[in-house]
């Protein structure tokens, strides 16, 4: 649905200064790409989303936090910033 896409767009604009509509920040394209990729990693691996929480079996009104990467089966835990920074990235073919 369009509402979900627009919600993600707004979240990115609010968290990445270079994407703000009326911004005073002057960033290069390279800096903007790096900042956007950093936030994308953080958003998917380290930021729990309330709408994705999972019910803990056997416990009433108890939930386990969940990130989009956990929901997609890419990881089994919420990553720390340290883990993100220490994980080598694969080079992207140009």
Image: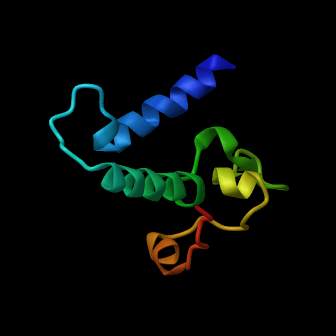
In the image, residue 22 above or below residue 87: above
Residue drawn at (29%, 41%) of the image: 18
Looking at the rendering, in which quadrant would you find the C terminus?
A: bottom right
Looking at the rendering, in which quadrant would you find the N terminus?
A: top right
Where residue 65 sits, quadrant-wise, is bottom right
Residue 57: x and y in percent read 84, 55
Residue 79: x and y in percent read 56, 68
**Colour setting:** rainbow
Outermost left residue: 24
Is 56 on the left-hand or right-hand side of 78?
A: right
Outermost right residue: 58
Residue sitting nearer the eye, 47 or 39: 39
Is 20 on the left-hand or right-hand side of 57?
A: left
In the image, residue 41 above or below residue 90: above
Residue 80: x and y in percent read 50, 70
In the image, residue 59 above or below residue 93: above
Residue drawn at (18%, 43%) of the image: 26
Is 87 on the left-hand or right-hand side of 23?
A: right
Residue 31: x and y in percent read 31, 55
Outermost front residue: 94
Outermost top residue: 2
Residue drawn at (45%, 35%) of the image: 11
Residue sitting nearer the eye, 48 or 73: 73
Is 14 on the left-hand or right-hand side of 63?
A: left
Mark count: 0
Where residue 21 sits, quadrant-wise, is top left
């Amino acid at each position: 649905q369009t509402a979900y896409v627009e919600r993600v767009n707004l979240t990115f604009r609010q968290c990445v200064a270079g994407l703000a509509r009326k911004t005073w920040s002057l960033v290069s394209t390279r800096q903007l790409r790096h900042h956007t990729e950093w936030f994308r990693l953080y958003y998917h691996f380290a930021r729990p989303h309330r709408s994705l929480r999972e019910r803990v079996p056997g416990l009433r009104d108890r939930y386990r936090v969940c990130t989009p990467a956990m929901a997609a089966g890419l990881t089994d835990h919420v990553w720390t910033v340290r883990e993100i920074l220490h994980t080598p990235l694969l080079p992207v073919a140009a």
